[in-house]
Image (spheres, helix red, strand yellow):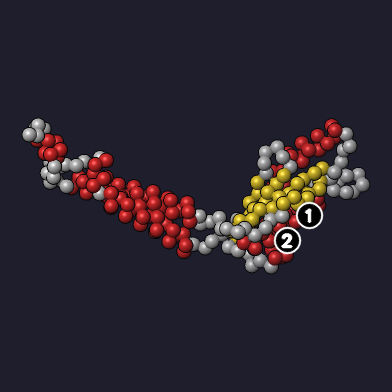
């Protein structure tokens, strides 16, 4: 009969194997993360305002209009009309479609604030891309926005948070990967302990004897 089925006792008996598997999983995950290209992310912030209206009602309507247009403005940020200028300014060896994969836009709901994030293997380059994208987006928005009677742009875009080079990489996250690797190794170690316990059919103590014979131990 098979003794020492999966139980806390079996894990205690093979705790060394469980611990070794957990450590190996953690080391393997961290080691693999070290072979990947580190990526850095920088973010710039923009503020959009509507340039007409003097009364409180006009200002409120202008704010609502601008807020409703934020999604469209965000789509412009990753379009060739903006990114082609970024590529030219920074001398990047890529095209707009490829660069768009490393640029992301987020807009908090019901606000006129936009965050433009750029990802690059170099922290300084990521900041340059984010700032250049913000600059060209502001120019394009003011160019494409409706004009007032005097011919001036009705939308103004201001930078409220310039991107700065990140101090730490955001990907790969060695700490998170190490923890995940350790958990996977722990699971493998527990499974290994159960297998070793299940294959152990020797009577090693009184409890094993009573479990096998279903008789009282004297």
Label placed on residue 139: 1
Asked which secondary structure carries label 2, the reply is: helix
Position in image of residue 158 (x %, y %): 78, 50
| Image quarter hosting the C terminus | top left
Task: Place residue 211 in its image quadrant.
Answer: top left
Q: Residue drawn 37% across and 50% down?
A: 184
Residue drawn at x 62%, y 61% as measured from the top left:
123
Above or below: residue 99 compared with residue 192:
below
3D distance between C-alphas at marks 1 and 2: 10 Å
Give x and y (percent) for residue 151. 90, 48
Q: Residue furthest left?
A: 218
Count of numbered tags = 2
Q: Which mark is residue 208?
A: none
Residue found 88% across the figure and 34% down from its top:
55
Of 69 and 24, nearer the camera is: 24
Q: How many other residues sit within 10 Å of disc 1, few (<14), some (14-19) or many (≥20)?
A: some
**What label does residue 85 carry, if any?**
2
Res 144 visible? no
Q: With respect to residue 54, does 165 lie above or below? A: below
Q: Quadrant of residue 58?
A: top right
> Mark 1 or mark 2: which comes first in sequence?
2
Quarter of the figure with the N terminus = top left
- Residue at 72% across / 47% down in the picture? 73
């Amino acid at each position: 009969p098979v003794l020492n089925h999966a139980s806390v006792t079996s894990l205690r008996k093979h705790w060394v194997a469980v611990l070794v598997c957990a450590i190996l999983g953690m080391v393997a995950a961290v080691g693999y993360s070290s072979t990947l290209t580190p990526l850095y992310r920088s973010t710039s912030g923009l503020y959009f305002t509507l340039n007409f209206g003097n009364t409180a009602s006009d200002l409120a309507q202008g704010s609502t209009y601008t807020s409703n247009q934020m999604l469209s403005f965000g789509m412009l940020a990753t379009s060739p009309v903006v990114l082609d200028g970024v590529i030219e300014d920074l001398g990047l060896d890529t095209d707009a479609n490829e660069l768009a994969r490393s640029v992301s836009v987020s807009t908090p709901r019901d606000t006129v604030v936009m965050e433009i994030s750029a990802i690059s293997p170099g922290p300084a380059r990521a900041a340059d891309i984010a700032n250049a994208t913000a600059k060209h987006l502001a120019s394009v928005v003011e160019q494409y926005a409706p004009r007032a009677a005097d011919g001036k742009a009705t939308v103004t875009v201001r930078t409220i948070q310039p991107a700065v080079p990140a101090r730490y990489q955001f990907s790969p996250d060695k700490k998170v990967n190490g923890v995940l690797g350790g958990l996977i190794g722990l699971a493998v170690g527990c499974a290994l302990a159960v297998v070793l316990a299940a294959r152990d059919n020797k009577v090693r103590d009184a409890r094993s004897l009573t479990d096998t014979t279903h008789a009282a131990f004297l």
